[in-house]
Amino acid sequence: MSTRFDIWDGTPFSGAKIALTWGAAIIAYRRDDRPDIPFPACWDLPGGGREGAESPVECALRETEEEFGLVIDPGRIVWLGRYPSWSGGAAPSYFLAAPVTAAETAGIRFGTEGSGWMLMPATDFVAHPEAVPHLRDRLEDYLRAAGAWPERRSQPSDGSGPTR
């Protein structure tokens, strides 16, 4: 498996998202369906905006605890990538990945943001027409580097997405 660790040099960034993997699945949640937020009703990953002087790792792990009640050890992070802002702003964002255990997924306490969560096959998220677009690309980057990308991909298991 290939890993990526883009070093954070202390420069400002907008936020961080994390793919929490359990086997071939990831923890995904459905965003609230409100017109005042980006990507309403789309499938999303844990994470969010930076607070104070936190690092990308601190940002992603704080959001994971707030949104899912999970405390992830920073030493379990296997991927840290710096990406341009999805909104065209100057500050980059970060994408991380870390494995979770069956016990952790069973102990999820879903917070107040979003309408529900699920363990979704990672390749289904990448193909899903209702997943946050830039996160589909970033997750695919990680899956390819990790050797978890299938040579051929079919429709998502629920049949709702395109074949790529």
Image (spheres, grey):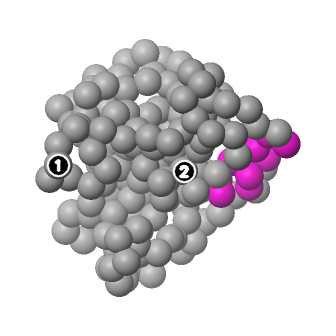
Element carrying mark 1:
loop
Q: Tell me which amino acid carries mark 2.
A: Arg
Residue 146 included in the magenta stretch of the image:
yes
Q: Give the range drawn in magenta.
A: 141-151
**Is residue 65 visible from the viewing direction of this image?**
no
Residue 68 on image: x %, y %:
31, 32
Q: What label sits on residue 136 in the rendered view?
A: 2
Looking at the image, is mark 2 or mark 1 nearer the viewer? 1
Q: Residues within 10 Å of mark 1 (few under 14, many from 20)?
A: few
Identity, as a three-letter code, of the amino acid under mark 1? Pro
Left or right placement of residue 34 versus residue 48 in this view: left
Examine the rendered structure and indicate whether residue 133 appears above or below residue 151: below
Q: Position of residue 140 (x, y in %)?
A: 64, 51
**Is 86 in the magenta?**
no
- Residue in view at x 40 percent, y 72 percent: 85
- Of 81 and 89, the residue lying toward us: 89
Q: Which residue is drawn at 74% across and 55% down?
A: 145
Q: What element carries label 2?
A: helix
**Residue, x 19% and y 68% (percent of image)?**
52
The quarter holding residue 30 reads top left
Report the residue marked by disc 1. Answer: 35
Q: Earlier in the sequence, mark 2 or mark 1?
A: 1
Left or right: where 92 falls relative to 135:
left
Q: Residue at x 53, y 74 (%)?
A: 7
Q: In which quarter of the image is residue 90?
A: bottom left
In the rendered image, residue 21, in percent from the top left (x then y), is placed at 57, 35
